[in-house]
Each structure stands twice: as C-alpha cells, then as structure tokens.
Image (cartoon, rainbow, N blue to C red):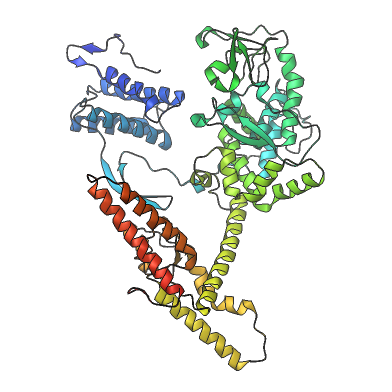
Amino acid sequence: MAFLVDDDLLFEDGRGVRATAVANEWLRLRPTENCPAPSSWGTYARILRDWIVAAQMHGVEVFDTRDRLKALLSTYAVDRATGDPRQRLGAVTWNQHVSVLGMFYRWAMAEQYATAVPFTSQQAVMLYAETVREVLVNQARRRVPKAHVTIKYLEDDFAATFINGLAGLRPDGSEDEGPGRYRGRHLARNGAVGELVMSSGTRLQEFSYLLACEIPPLPPAPRLMPIAFPLPEAITKGSKFRVTWTSYSALARVHSYLSLERMLACEGSVWRPPKRWGAPLFVSEMDSRGGRANGRRVHWHTLRPAERRRLVAPDGGSMLLAVRSDGGPFTAWSTVFERTAQRIRERFEPRFPHVHPHCCRHTFAMATMERLVAGFYEQAARLSAAGGDADAALSNYLTTTEPLLVLRDLLGHSSVLTTEKYLNRPGGAQAIFLAEVGKEEESRNQTLTLQAFRDYQAGRRPSGPGARDLLAFFASVECQLKELDVTAPTVKRSGQELINLLARRVGALHLGLANYCWFLDPGKALCLNLARSSDRSKPLVGMCDSARCPQATHHSCHRNVWATSAATSRAFISKIGRGQSTERARLTVEAERAERIVAGIDAADHGESYGPDQ
C-alpha cells in the first residue's frame, strides 16, 4: 500500500493529527472503494503528496478555511498550467488530479476532518446510455478536445510501416541497406511483440507481463480464422479474465522469436531480480498452467505483475515473453514505440504520428471492426469449414453476434459505449460500420412499418397516445392506393410503391422498449422536453414514457411485455409488508399503467377504441 510520511517522520504534533495521517487513512480505504488496481493507489498517493507539499510551501493548512483553500487552488492551478515545465500538467492529467482531490475532500468532510473544500461545483445534466441524470461538475476542470478530433489509431499502411520499423525494415518490408539504418540488437523481439499487439489489442500491462508459457500453441498449418488468445485476470484491467484473438502470422512470428533469439538470450543466464523487487521466485516443474515457485505450486493466472517479473526460469533468465540480452525481463515498450516512430519520421515519412502502446489497441479495434462489418471473418469461417479446419464455436459466434458486441468482448469492455469511443473517428472502419448499421435499420423500419399498415388493413389497430395520428396517416395512404387503382386499373402494383408512400413514417420510426416511437416532431417528444436536451436529432428512447408521449404507439407485438410487467408488479405487491406503503403505492401505479396499456392493445386489436387517446 502507498502511504505518505512527513520529513520529521511524525504523524501527530501539538495541534493533533496531521494531514498526512488523514491522507493515509483515506488511501487505506481505496482497495475496498472501487479502486482495485495497485497502480492507482500509488497515483492517488502522489497526487495528495503534491497537494500537501504545495499547501506547506504557501503556508496553508490542508484543512483550512474555504477562502484560503480557494486561494491555494488558484495558485496551484496556475503553477501546474504555466509554471516550471517539469511540473506542468496536461488537461487530462490535471482533471485526474482535480477528481482525486475532490474525492478526498468529500470523504474528509463526511468524516469531519475538513470544514470546507477548495472546489466550486455546478449542477449539470448528463446524458449517458440514453439515461439523463443530474451531476455536480467541478469548475476547476480544464476543457479537453473531443475524442473524434484526435487521431488515436494507425491506418493500414502506417500500421504495416510501424511493424516493419520495429523489425528494422523499410516501410515496404525490404531490408534497410542505407547508411543510416538502425542496427538494434532485439529487432526480432520488437517486431514479434509489435505485430502480436496489433493483432490482439492487448493493453501495455497485459503484453508486458505476459509469460512465454502463456503464448497459445501454433496451429499445424496456416489459417484465415483468428486464433484464441486467453489473457489471465492477474494482468488485465479490472482483474477480468478475457479471451481475445490473434492472427496466425503474428503468432508464428512470436514462436519464431521464442525458439531462437529468446532461447539464446536466456540460455545459461545468471540474471536475478534486483533486491528492491523482492526475493527471486525460482520456477521448477512448470507447464502451461503453473509450476513450483520456490517449491510451492502456483498457477500463472494468479500471479500479478510485481510477482511475474521476479520469476526465474528453470534454465535461467526471466519467465516474461520479452527479455533483454542478459535474459532479464524487458518492459520499456513505451520507449521502444516512441523511438521507432521517431526513426520513421526522420528517415521515411515526416507525417508519421507519435505511437504509444495504447495506439496499437485502437488500431486493432478499427481494423477488426472493418473486417467484421465487411464479412471477412464470416467468409474465413466458411472457407475453414470447407477445408475441414473450422473452430465450430468461434464460427458460430462470429456469424450470430453483432460486430460491436464481438469487439466489446475482444477489448474487454463492460459496455459497448466504451467500445464506441474507440470507433469515434470519421471515415475508415467507422464510416463502413455506420453505413452498414444505417442500412440494416432502414430495412428493419420498412418491415415493421409495412407490418403495421397490413395490420391496419386487417382491422388490427394500434393503441397509445400517437395512435390517432398514425391511423390518419394509414387512411391517407389507403386513399392514395385506391386513387392509383382508379387511374390505372390494369397496372400491376409493386410493393415498392407502397413503401414509397410509407417512406415518411419509415424514416421517423424508432424502437422503444415496448412501443414504437414515430419521431416526426422534436417539439412533441416528451423525452427531449423532460431532459431539456439540446440535441434534438433523435429521441432518448431510454427515457420514453409511451403512455404519455404523443408520438408513441403500442401494437400487438408489445402486449406480452406489458402483460408480464403488470403480472410482475402485482406479484411484488402481494409480498410487500405493511410498513412499505411508499413502495406499494409506486408498484400499484406501475401495475395499473401496464394493465391500461394491455387493455388498450386488446381493444385496438379488435378494431375498438379504448381510452381518450384512441
């Protein structure tokens, strides 16, 4: 655990407990309060240290009055923005500092250590996953650029150039015979790991602390289908096990490095971890799942980065995938990537961007989404099946799962909203993906609108607040069809004519949780009016109250959802005790609302009117 100590090694003085002791108490609570990553504990401690040092330099107490704390924050912000270049913070890093200090002071206020906070907050409305909620925004935060205006990935030609640059080759993959060529000692290692990262989307910590024995075995023959690549939870973000994939060519390159350059570097190595890392862990009786470390059986997936870098292989050298010339572990990939990008700019392509390890993850996301949307992996699955070399589970997964969900699982995100940020760049794979999504949505809306019109012709009417307008529109379409039959009775009608007449409603249709939203007039959209949203280009479907919105309709396909909701609410009501009157009243209102909607659907399904909205 990270902790702070004053220069005199005291935690109390004549005035009582010092700020460092209070900070240490807060730091000790981080592992149990949604901060499980050890690296974050050290980051939080350093942020508090810098703040406390700044307070001491300006003669301000950490828990002083609000006026003095605000004056300190102002001075601190100026110093970190325009002061000593070595101490300056970028906007993103500064916002992280402000967030951590804000959490610390809120906790100190709750524990009655502090009587005031240095920050001023303003109430704002936040929209996330189509859910609107009110939040407090710290006014000390700096503005940062939108995600889509910064290039975070490499296009295909730049990605190939970078991988070749790691291996000491020219951009076209040929040998570099020029006078200024790079003569690195670990070109095979750098090229192999770089291509592995580009083809798997692993994070810096994940591929830096991967063990050589955790590399998947190489298939006996080349294949188009990707190869499963499990990542142990001890080195992944959030300690969540996941399975990504990699390509055959990348895996073959890694195995080539393992069998030659790495073997020579580790053979007879006398490397031992430095004492500041802790005692070495000598491995014996090892396999792909685990081994004995200092005589005790351990599983690799339980070992964290700090323990993995202390592993010593039975034949000498580190157990990590990437090693130095002396067999010790190599983890300075940020430096390798930065220097490679600099060499490419100087010798071949002045436009080549700065490349950091996370840029490779974004590159993988964009390239994978482009292949998923274009059907590359589906075609590869069919070819593999025809050749008798098919992974049935993977093939079924690729052909039945939405591309965005596949990418979410490969990257290890909890929500597709995070995955969408990786694709938030106009053009390239995102343009292809959005075009594909738009085409699918248009086809779906045509089918649903046409079915609603056929139901109307069969006497099955919609219900809900927007039913009257929809019925009037369907009646006008029916009149236009009859006029066409009168003017040209011998002409055979095609389905496209009807779709053209319904086009206005097709373009306005949005699917709610249990209703259709005909988004024709943003001014009538109840969700936008309640949320006071400035973006009125589409409805907030997650906030839809279909029983009140004048543009919502219910159809027979929605009946089961509402009937189940009513039955569930009634079941909960029967189990609520007498003391929970508020909850009983809330559930009763929900049950009655659902029952009214079901009754309206049933009545409209038989061509009858129900309620004032029909």
Picture coordinates of residue 431, whole percent (x, y): 59, 55
Q: Nearer the viewer, residue 501 or 449?
A: 449
Picture coordinates of residue 351, whole percent (x, y): 62, 42
Is residue 532 shown to the viewer in this render? no
Query: Which residue is drawn at the image coordinates 55% and 37% (left, top)?
Result: 412
Query: Which residue is drawn at the image coordinates 29% and 46% (left, top)?
Result: 576
Looking at the image, which residue sits at the far front?
574
Q: Using residue 282 as the reference point, say whether residue 600 is left or right of it.
A: left
Q: Nearer the viewer, residue 147 or 406?
A: 406
Picture coordinates of residue 41, whole percent (x, y): 41, 23
Q: Nearer the viewer, residue 613 or 217?
A: 613
Position above or below: 103 against 571:
above
Picture coordinates of residue 111, whole percent (x, y): 23, 27
Position above or below: 88 against 19:
below
Quarter occupied by residue 185: top right
Query: Which residue is drawn at the image coordinates 40% and 26% (left, top)?
Result: 87
Quadrant occupied by the C terminus: bottom left
Please count the marks in the image.
Answer: 0
Quadrant occupied by the N terminus: top left
Position above or below: 329 against 588:
above
Query: Which residue is drawn at the image coordinates 63% and 92% (left, top)?
Result: 488
Q: Using residue 537 as the reference point, say whether residue 319 is left or right of it.
A: right
Is residue 299 shown to the viewer in this render? yes
